[in-house]
Image: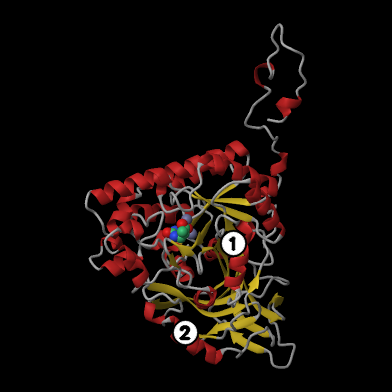
Amino acid sequence: MRAQHLAAALALVLLACGAAGEDILIKGGTVVNADRQFQADVLIRGGLIARVGPNLQAERQGTRTLSAAGRLVMPGGIDPHTHLSMPFMGQVTCDDFFSGHAAALAGGTTMHVDFALPVDHDLLAGWDAWQRKAADGVMDYGFHMAVTSWSDKVAADMGTLTKMGVNSFKFFMAYKGALMVNDEQLLQALRRCKELGAVPQVHAENGDAVAEGQARVFAAGITGPEGHALSRPAALEGEATARAIRLAQFVGAPLYVVHVMSRDAAEEVARARQRGQRVVGETVASAIACDESSMWDADFTRAAAFVMSPPIRSKEHQAALQGALAGGLLQLVGTDHAVFNSSQKAAGRHDFRIIPNGVNGLEERLHVVWTELVASGKLAPTDFVRVTSTAAAHIFNVYPRKGLIAKGSDADVIIFDPALEHTLRAAAHHSALDTNIYEGYKARGKVLTTISRGRLVWHEGRLNITRGSGRFVPTPTHGPLYAGLDAVPEHSLFDVARYGGVPVRRAGDAPASGAARDEL
Ligand code: URQ
Ligand code: ZN
Ligand code: ZN
């Protein structure tokens, strides 16, 4: 449904039911949290979950009772990785906070964390710009901030932003000449994140090698979307992931690797976790459900729709990522929803290097993850909730307010029919995008009802949303990734104690205290 049609159609139902007025009672379902599933009813009041238990009765006049018999009642999805109204590669992603949220809610996602970009490398100007963009929103959202340069002001502004409710900062190791930072800047930024108790996130691809790969592939006369896949091999993602992980180890900071698209990167995350390093691996829906062959499609529009970075990989990588998720080596699934419509993508009709990078997924994520991983028996429903909601709530420190069906949590709840089959189509989606990389995808399991902050916003195939009813959710620093981390001695990597300690005392050396050593 095109944006103007969406706005017109939805405007009609605006105001239908905005604030969380009436009580909602969900009867007869199976509640699924990340730790267990159980038969229970759920009573919702004033935007919060008031009761969870057997045989609950309506307590007030006008209570809306919904049957969930034979269905699952789960926490609303949390998408940790989106780009709404983002200026990038000379274009602006065509989903704004209104259409993006509409898509999310129709797909059972009730909160997302969007990447704010600095304006002219100014983080606070970026924050202001993103707050303005979000004014059109209709659901809960948080912000990560990207850091694309380094200076004392950037370091200071990171501190300021943590006081305003941002606890995560992203660093691009690719997009040379645009967003990319070098290792020296990355080290400074990692150290600053540690000081602030903030989550450092990396886009891990070797930007210098990618630039060379692009030049070589284009020079070889390969100008189409398939060139995008060829020019950014998985080894360049593996290398940068390993490098970022080791630099985080050197600084003693946790690390969050966004959009893990390959076995190479997943193995680096797994290896770090195996040696006890606090590294989180986030993959995305397109990586576990799509494969690179689509970029070889003879239809440019279809092929270009799949162009994102790091690239969608082969079926082998897809299987490895599904296995890593099922085995707990990767912790959560986002979307990296960054949509450019076919005319925007056509800017790169004869040069894959300028096709704006990004794919859709906000509305499809839960359906795709359920179909690929739960319906196939690779993942239990409780783990589904963990990788699509609870893990993000934990990592970004908003649990148990978010990511849980329990008394006192925000009433972000979905009713899900695990067996209902349906086909994903652009014609039926709520994004402003005119294509859909999941066109024709046969999904198992469907979100029938979405409740956002106690408001019935998606039900029986209809959206009931109010423009401007979105809400910023601050994400406080010093979340679980930092719990107990201060017990690790500051200079743990510089093993100053070995061989009798340092500095070594030699004849003629001036007497010195250990103070400098302790600054290491
Ligand atoms: O790199 C990202 O995460 C942004 C720029 C979205 N685009 C993409 O291709 N991943
Ligand atoms: Zn990225
Ligand atoms: Zn992204």
Q: Under tag 2, what secondary structure?
A: helix
Classify residue 503 by image quadrant: top right
Rendered image quadrant of residue 67: bottom right
Residue at the disc numbered 2: 6
Query: Residue 126: x percent and y percent?
Result: 59, 61
The residue tagged 1 is: 126
On screen, 114 above or below 253? below
Circle 1: element type: helix
Mark before the other along the chain sequence, 1 or 2: 2
The residue type indicated by label 2 comes to Leu
Identify the mark at residue 4; answer none if there is no mark. Answer: none
Check disc 1: other Cα within 10 Å, few if <14, some if 14-19, many if 20+: some
- Tell me what residue is drawn at x 42 percent, y 63 percent: 90
Decide which of 196, 279 is in the foreground and name it. Answer: 196
Q: Residue furthest front?
A: 120
In the image: residue 6, left or right of residue 194: left
Seen from this angle, which residue lies furthest top? 507
10 Å crowding of disc 2: few (<14), some (14-19), many (20+): some
Is label 1 in contact with label 2 (beta carbons under 8 Å)? no
- For badge 1, the amino acid type reads Gly
Residue 368, image x, y percentages: 43, 68
Which residue is more in the foreground, 466 or 450?
466
Above or below, 418 against 336 in this view is below
> Could you tell me which residue is drawn at 72 percent across and 81 percent down?
46
